[in-house]
Amino acid sequence: MADKKKRLQRDVSTLDQWIEVAAHDGETVTETYPSNEVLKEKLARMTPVPDLVYRRFHFRGGVPEEYNWVQPSDQQRELGGLCIQRMTVDEWIKLSIAEGNSAGGHLLPCFDPRPRPKIRGECECKACVANRERLERSGLEVL
C-alpha cells in the first residue's frame, strides 16, 4: 500500500546550485555553480516553475565564521562538510537580491527554509523536523 501511495505522489522539480566555501589566506571565498545570474536565466526558461531551489554547500577545510548560521557541529566547524538549503523559488529570488546587496559576497540563510520532500524520503534531522512542523502549523503545503 505504501508503494502505491508513493507512486501517486508527484515528483518534486528543483533548481539546483552547488556552493564551494573555503578560506584562502585568511579570507573566506564563496563560489556558486551556476551563479545566481545564470540560475535566474535558467529559471526564466523553465516550464513549469520548479517547486524548490536546492543549494548544496561544500565547506572545504572547515566552516568559516561568515557561515555560522548553518549551525555546524564542532567537527564540521573544524573539518568542513556539507549542508543543504531548500526554499521556494520566490524565497530564492528574494534571497539572491539580499545577497547581491550584502557585503563580502557571502550567501545568507534563507528566510523560510523547507524540509526534505516526502517523496524523496523525509529527513528526521532537527532542522527538517522543525521546518515541517512549522509549515504544518501555518497551513502551508509540505511537499
Image (cartoon, helix red, strand yellow):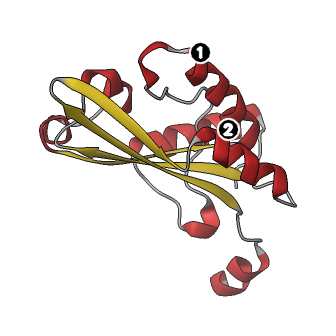
Q: Position of 53 compared to 83: left or right?
A: right
Marks 1 and 2, the one that precedes in the sequence: 1
Q: Secondary structure at mark 2?
A: helix
Q: Position of 21 compared to 32: left or right?
A: left
Q: Residues within 10 Å of mark 2 (few under 14, many from 20)?
A: some
User: Which of label 1 and label 2 is nearer to you?
Assistant: 1
Q: Split into 4 quadrants, where in the image is the C terminus? A: bottom right
The residue depicted at 71 percent of the width and 63 percent of the height is 13
Residues 28 and 131: in front is 28
The residue that mark 1 highlights is: 101
Question: Which label sits on residue 40?
Answer: none
Q: Position of 74 compared to 57: left or right?
A: left
Residues 111 and 60: in front is 60
Q: Secondary structure at mark 1?
A: helix
Q: Residues within 10 Å of mark 1 (few under 14, many from 20)?
A: few
**Amino acid type assigned to the residue bearing label 2 in the image:** Leu
Quadrant in the rendering for residue 137: top right
Q: How far across and down, in percent of the image, does residue 47 sit?
A: 87, 61
Q: Is residue 81 above or below residue 106?
A: below
Q: Is residue 96 above or below residue 19?
A: above
Q: How far across and down, in percent of the image, does residue 3 sit?
A: 65, 85
The residue depicted at 72 percent of the width and 43 percent of the height is 40
Q: Is residue 129 above or below residue 113?
A: below
The residue that mark 2 highlights is: 135
**Amino acid type assigned to the residue bearing label 1 in the image:** Asn
Q: How far across and down, in percent of the image, does residue 39 sit?
A: 66, 48
Quadrant in the rendering for residue 61: top left
Determine the CA span between mark 1 and mark 2.
Answer: 28 Å
Q: Split into 4 quadrants, where in the image is the N terminus? A: bottom right
